[in-house]
Image: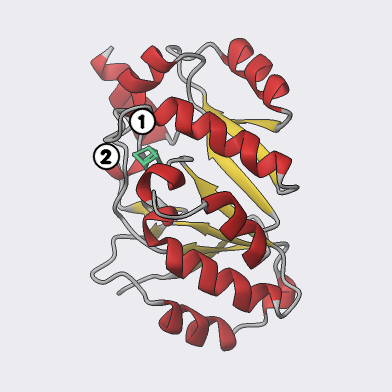
């Protein structure tokens, strides 16, 4: 079964892709097929038409927000993110993008922040995950060079464009959470600490 959306935390999450421009050591994709009991492995990535058709069947007013996420990086499907955001915003629904912040590297031909702003994106949640580029590269293993710098620029650009921003870290011993919190303050964004799933914690713990 191809699960292209799922409910959690009073939100509706859209599962756009299983691909990613990073390979984080703690990524859930390495330890499980999904989250909250949903198998999020896609046999086929949904088109914007398929997503909109599915969303039309739902009562979207019952959710706090609709969140682009996925067992992968949504901005690899940037055209879908924009099209579905426009459709949702035309209906007055709150929309968030959960991302690794590599959008500008993935879509170099676009001014990604202004495209998101034009589409009406309300907020973004970006995986910061490390207090330094060196540590980021070791933990997140991005495919693009300068991914850390580009991610920070993405957060700053979004905040300056008036999109509400939050950065997140996962709670693992390698990360200096307080330094990340300070960085988040400098970026002017909110800060959130995520807890690793039990299976991921165990796997990472066993390897250390
Ligand atoms: S950025 Fe997210 S989806 Fe991509 S590898 Fe890291 S944790 Fe997984």
Q: Is residue 155 left or right of residue 64?
A: left
In the displayed structure, would residue 105 be above or below residue 42? above
Of residues 150 and 128, the one drawn nearer to the viewer in this rendering: 150
**The N terminus - image quarter:** bottom left
Quadrant assignment, res 2: bottom left
Q: What x and y, as percent, mark residue 190?
A: 72, 33
What residue is drawn where x is 29% and y is 28%?
141
Label 2 CB, ligand 1: below 8 Å? yes
Query: Does residue 194 appear in the picture of this structure?
Result: no
What residue sits right under mark 2 in the picture? 30
What residue is drawn where x is 62% and y is 47%?
124
Quadrant assignment, res 153: top right
Query: Does residue 187 appear in the picture of this structure?
Result: yes
Of residues 120 and 94, the one drawn nearer to the viewer in this rendering: 120
In the displayed structure, would residue 163 be above or below residue 15? above
The residues bearing labels 2 and 1 have C-alpha atoms spaced at a distance of 7 Å
Numbered label attached to residue 96: none
Element marked by disc 1: loop
Mark 2 neighbour density, 10 Å: few (under 14) some (14–19) many (20 or more): few
Q: What x and y, as percent, mark residue 43?
A: 23, 69
Q: Is residue 136 left or right of residue 58?
A: left
What residue is drawn where x is 74% and y is 76%?
61
Asked if marks 2 and 1 touch (Cβ < 8 Å), the reply is yes
What residue sits right under mark 1 in the picture? 26
Taking the image as four quarters, which one is ligand 1 found in? top left
Label 1 CB, ligand 1: below 8 Å? yes
What residue is drawn where x is 51% and y is 23%?
171
Of residues 9 and 140, the one drawn nearer to the viewer in this rendering: 140
Query: How is the model colour-coded?
Result: secondary structure
């Amino acid at each position: 079964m191809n699960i292209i959306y799922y409910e959690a935390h009073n939100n509706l999450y859209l599962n756009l892709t299983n691909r990613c421009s990073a390979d984080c050591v703690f990524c859930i994709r390495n330890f499980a097929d999904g989250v909250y009991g949903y198998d999020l492995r896609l046999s086929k990535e949904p088109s914007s038409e398929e997503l909109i058709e599915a969303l039309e069947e739902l009562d979207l007013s019952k959710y706090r927000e609709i969140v682009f996420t996925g067992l992968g990086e949504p901005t690899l499907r940037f055209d879908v993110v924009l099209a579905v955001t426009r459709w949702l915003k035309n209906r007055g629904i709150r929309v968030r993008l959960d991302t690794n912040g590599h959008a500008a590297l993935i879509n170099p031909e676009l001014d990604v922040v202004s495209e998101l702003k034009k589409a009406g994106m309300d907020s973004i949640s970006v995986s910061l995950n490390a207090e330094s580029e060196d540590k980021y590269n070791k933990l997140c293993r991005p495919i693009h060079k300068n991914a850390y710098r580009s991610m920070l620029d993405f957060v700053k650009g979004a905040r300056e464009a008036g999109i509400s921003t939050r950065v997140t870290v996962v709670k693992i011993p390698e990360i200096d959470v307080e330094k990340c919190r300070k960085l988040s303050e400098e970026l002017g964004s909110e800060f959130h600490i995520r807890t690793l799933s039990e299976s991921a914690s165990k796997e990472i713990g066993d390897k250390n």
